[in-house]
Amino acid sequence: MPAFAYRAVDARGSSKAGVIEASSPAAARQLLRDRELLPTSVEAATAGGAAPGLVARFRKRIGARALSTVTRQIATLVTSEVNVEHALKLVADQAESATLRSLLLDVRGAILDGYSFAAALKLHPGTFPEFYTASVAAGEQAGRLPQVLEHLADFVENRQRNQQKIQLALLYPALLALVSFGMMALLMVYVVPDIVRVFISRGAELPFLTRALIAISTGLQSYGLAMMIALLAAILLFGRWLRVPANRLRFDRGFARTWPFARFSRQYNAARFAASLATLVQSSVPLVEALNAAAAVTPNVHFREAALGVAARVREGASLQAAMGESGIFPSMLVAIVASGENGGQLGPALARAAAELERELEAMAAMLVALVEPLVLLLMGGLVLLMVLAILLPIINLNNIVGM
């Protein structure tokens, strides 16, 4: 059943807004009147039953944390023998976000219109990645949807937790650098000019360091706004340049091969790929389809192309271990664990172990990166401050010469 976003006024004149399920806009308005609300606006909030192209245009998006919570809630209800359609309704009723509630009602409406659960999820590719819908489809086909949803909930929660750890680990150095450069800019614009103005008024020949400081300060005062606008424009143009697939592939390839980013990029993408592939294989998704789906959610395009090449080689009859080894991009530890899993008929658990090990190594690398970046930022800022102090103190040291002129 479609959902509609409404705005209404109650008997006291207070504004109300939300999402309501109804068969048509007229039915939605009648339901609101039955609730003693005067509807002022009723618009389609979902695309249930519409063509896929139209659905893609109006698809909803939710964050990784919300997806993790929703997956766990649905998995718990379905495991308790609640049917999917009713589970979606219960979770939607508890949702605090109107966007999330609208999304869940949209999925539920598509199921009521005859879609399978996986097909309904596919109508929202911006929210539910390919590995997610592939796992659900495999669970529906094998009659193991509760087990697959439980496993999928664990995976989504772990992925969200690991991403949050990395983001928090890198947040402090980034804020430290941003605040430090901001303070330096403020000093250059508002403090340094007043300090060095007395030296300029003397007409004395100032040291090179002082003259450079004055030039930079004057440049920031005169062209600071223009420089900021130019920087923002450059960032926007770079973002548009990256939207071109060939440019994105070129950039990601360079990032994956450039020190010191190469190893971190390799570990991060391998961990994402292995974790997604483990979830799909353990959900009984055919290996070639699982490889394609896992590749689709790999962030680095260069790594993604290599993963798709592995899928093509497996489709041709090569073993997964051989195909991954030929690509030359996967860590040797991952290839070795895949080989042992294939030989022992335990590929899914082997991939899960490899993903866990890669995640541990990634956390260690992130911790080491933070441990290195913090002192580097402090040293850089200290060096810049030292240069500023020297630029100001050098004329004072030569004050006698300045006075004598």
Image: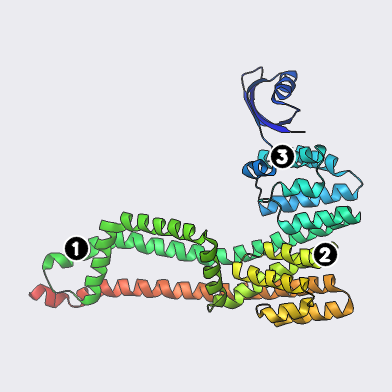
Image height of 12 relative to 306, above or below: above
Quadrant that contains the N terminus:
top right
- How packed mark 1 is, by other alpha carbons closer than 10 Å (few <14, some 14-19, many 20 or more), is few
Q: Check disc 2 and report its element: helix, strand or loop.
A: loop
- Label number found at residue 101: 3
The three-letter code of the residue at mark 1 reads Arg
Q: Nearer the viewer, mark 1 or mark 3?
A: 3
Residue with the mark numbered 2: 286
Residue at 83 percent of width and 70 percent of height: 348
Tag 2 and tag 3, C-beta contact below 8 Å? no
Q: Kindly identify the amino acid type of the residue bearing the numbered disc 2.
A: Pro
Residue at image coords 68%, 51%: 125
Q: Earlier in the sequence, mark 1 or mark 2?
A: 1
How many numbered discs?
3
Dot 1 and dot 3 residues touching (CB under 8 Å): no
Q: Is residue 12 above or below residue 130?
A: above
Q: Is residue 235 left or right of residue 314?
A: left
* Label 1 to label 3: alpha-carbon separation: 61 Å
N-terminal-most mark, 1 or 3: 3
| Residue drawn at 75 percent across, 56 percent down | 132
Q: Quadrant of residue 329?
A: bottom right
Question: Picture coordinates of residue 277 (x, y %)?
Answer: 76, 67
Among numbered discs 2 and 3, the one appearing first in the sequence: 3
374 relative to 359 in the view: left or right: left
| Mark-to-mark CA distance, 1 and 2 | 74 Å
Q: Quadrant of residue 221?
A: bottom left
- Quarter occupied by residue 152: bottom right
Question: Is residue 144 among what the camera can see?
Answer: no
- Residue at which label 1 appears: 197
